[in-house]
Image (tube, rainbow, N blue to C red):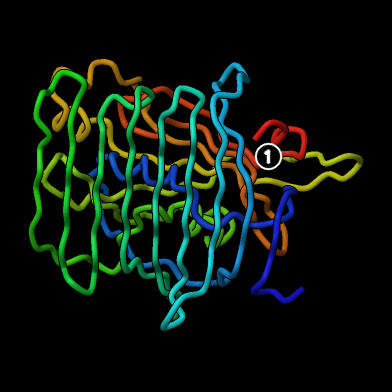
Amino acid sequence: MSDNHKVFGSHREAIAGLAIVIAIAALMSTLAEASPIEVRFPEGVTHGYLLVQSLSGEPIGQGEMTQMIGGGDLVENHLVFRFKDGSLHEENVAFSQHGVFTLMSYRLVQRGPFFPEQLDVSIDRNKAEYSVRSKTRVQEKEDVLDGQIDLPKDIYNGMLITVSKNLEKDANEMVSILAFTPAPQIINVQLLALDKGSVHTGELSNKTTQYIFKPQIGMIQKLLGKAAGKLPAHFQYDCWIMANETPSFVKFEGPLQLMGPTVRIELAANGDLAGR
């Protein structure tokens, strides 16, 4: 099996860009000096399954991620979560990895009762275009917004886990995302390496690094107004990555939408897929 062709079902295999990560597209922060992330571990062809749980460990959904190399050497990542209540979270990310990671296009669809807001958002670097369709539970009519936008090179919607796998040891970096409020706003997010730990697979033990994706709570409160009072005082997303020769995804905890419930996402074991 070549380095660019992997099929994973264990903690050793890399997941290329959980779109959770997209959820973070709803985050807002005003940290400074974000910059593109250098490619240290190029992404390849990948296919894997994920389990979505509540923090109490109750299974609430399942996911599937596929990643291919498309035309012009673009990496094309597709992630979908299907929930027991019929809700859907689906994202498509296309990026290049020539020296640094560069997001080329992105689309996120979130619909169903699990999500406080029904969303369909997209951005395209080459066309310099964005589109937003959104509707809250109390709205009768959908909001539609589109227009032109020039994306900085460090925009990483749907890619925060991918770029975190490429950070140097004990890194403390800042990157950007495009937040839709509903108009698009470029926001910086801190990627902070925190605790060291380990994960066990049978008798094997591997080191892990916990990363925090941290926005500034003050900016979130400014944009959300009174609704921000529901947020915890220290708002962040947590991600654990295998810290060995080939860094790979282990676990994520955070909401898939800013005001949505916190979930835990892990690689699915064979038994988790029973009844799919």
Residue 87 in the figure: left or right of residue 55: left
- Residue beneath the point at 59% across and 58% down: 169
x then y, percent, for residue 46: 61, 62
Question: Which residue does the image show at 43% across and 56% down from the upper left?
Answer: 159
Q: Residue at x 53, y 68 (%)?
A: 68
The residue type indicated by label 1 comes to Ala
In the rendered structure, the answer to whether residue 263 lies left or right of residue 118 reads right
Residue 206 percent coordinates (x, y): 78, 47
Picture quarter containing residue 227?
Answer: top left
Give the quarter of the figure containing the C terminus.
top right
- The residue that label 1 is drawn on is 268
- Can you say whether 268 is above or below 152 in the image? above
Residue shown at 43% from the left, 75% from the top = 74
- Hey, which residue is sitting farthest bottom in the picture? 72
Q: In the rendered view of the protein, which quadrant contains the N terminus?
A: bottom right
Q: Does residue 50 appear left or right of residue 29 in this picture?
A: right
Residue 14, above or below 62: below
Q: Is residue 90 above or below residue 84?
A: below
Q: Name the element at disc 1.
A: loop
The one nearer the camera, 30 or 248, is 248
Q: Position of residue 39 (x, y in %)?
A: 50, 72
Where 20 sits versus 85, above or below? below
Where is residue 50, by image quadrant? top right
